[in-house]
Image (cartoon, rainbow, N blue to C red):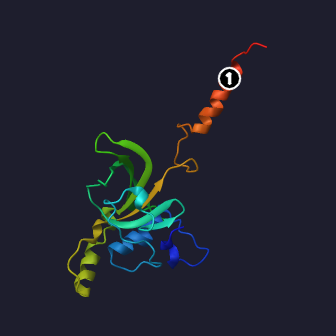
Amino acid sequence: MGDNVANLPPGFRFYPTDEELVVHFLQRKAALLPCHPDVIPDLELYPYDPWELEGKALSEGNKWYFFSRRTPDRITGNGYWKAMGDDPVFGSSSKKVGMKQSLVYYLGETPGGMRTNWIMHEYRLSNGTNSGSSSSRSSKRKGHPMIDYSKWVVCRVYERGDDNNDDDGAELSCLDEVFLSLDDLDEISTPN
């Protein structure tokens, strides 16, 4: 675990659901309200490749969490994040509270990059939960310049591996290929 989780009491782990990331963290960030515990850092993601997040983002296991500003330019030093699709995030009352966009990291330049196992879920507020009007009032009241806080996203980045349930099992590991080749050897008859 990284040093970023020092704000959590001993024994506590950070495994938020999609709803918790949107409702308890992102909505509060967009409304300029404090997050308790304040453990997710602000990070400008796009100068960094995903393997460079250690020590910069909140890490829990093999997942990194951070707030960032939403931008259409998702190019890093060695590659780019390609959007794969959007899914709604529903609250406990079955009301849509946000959107989750899945992105895959590609090494190289667009469009011919090489797909990697790095995945990012980028959570944003849906139009109905946009806290822009309350954040504008809050900004004026506190004397801060007018900033559109509805552009904040909270991100979860991880490298998909063998132990992750997101894998559909279609790809064989090197060990699987060895065992399958041994099965083929059994079918070959050898002279005695």
The amino acid at mark 1 is: Leu
Q: Can residue 91 be seen in this view?
A: no
The answer to which image quadrant residue 191 occupies is top right
**Residue 161 as seen in the image, left or right of residue 136:** right
Mark 1 nearby-residue class (10 Å; few <14, some 14–19, many ≥20): few
Q: In this view, does 147 lie above or below 68?
A: below
Judged from this view, the residue extending furthest toward the front is 192
The answer to which image quadrant residue 39 occupies is bottom left
| Residue at x-position 46% and y-position 79% | 36
Q: Which part of the image, by quadrant, shows the C terminus?
A: top right
Judged from this view, the residue extending furthest toward the top is 191
Residue 55: horizontal and vertical position, in percent? 44, 68
Q: Can residue 175 be seen in this view?
A: yes
| Residue at x-position 61% and y-position 38% | 175
| Residue at x-position 35% and y-position 68% | 43
Residue at label 1? Answer: 185
Mark 1 element type: helix
**Residue 168 as seen in the image, left or right of residue 186:** left
Residue 28: horizontal and vertical position, in percent? 38, 75
Residue 113: horizontal and vertical position, in percent? 33, 42
Residue nearest the observer in this picture, 97 or 102: 102
Residue nearest the observer in this picture, 11 or 99: 11
**Residue 191 as seen in the image, left or right of residue 98:** right
Residue 54: horizontal and vertical position, in percent? 45, 64
How many numbered badges does the structure rendering display? 1
| Residue at x-position 52% and y-position 59% | 62
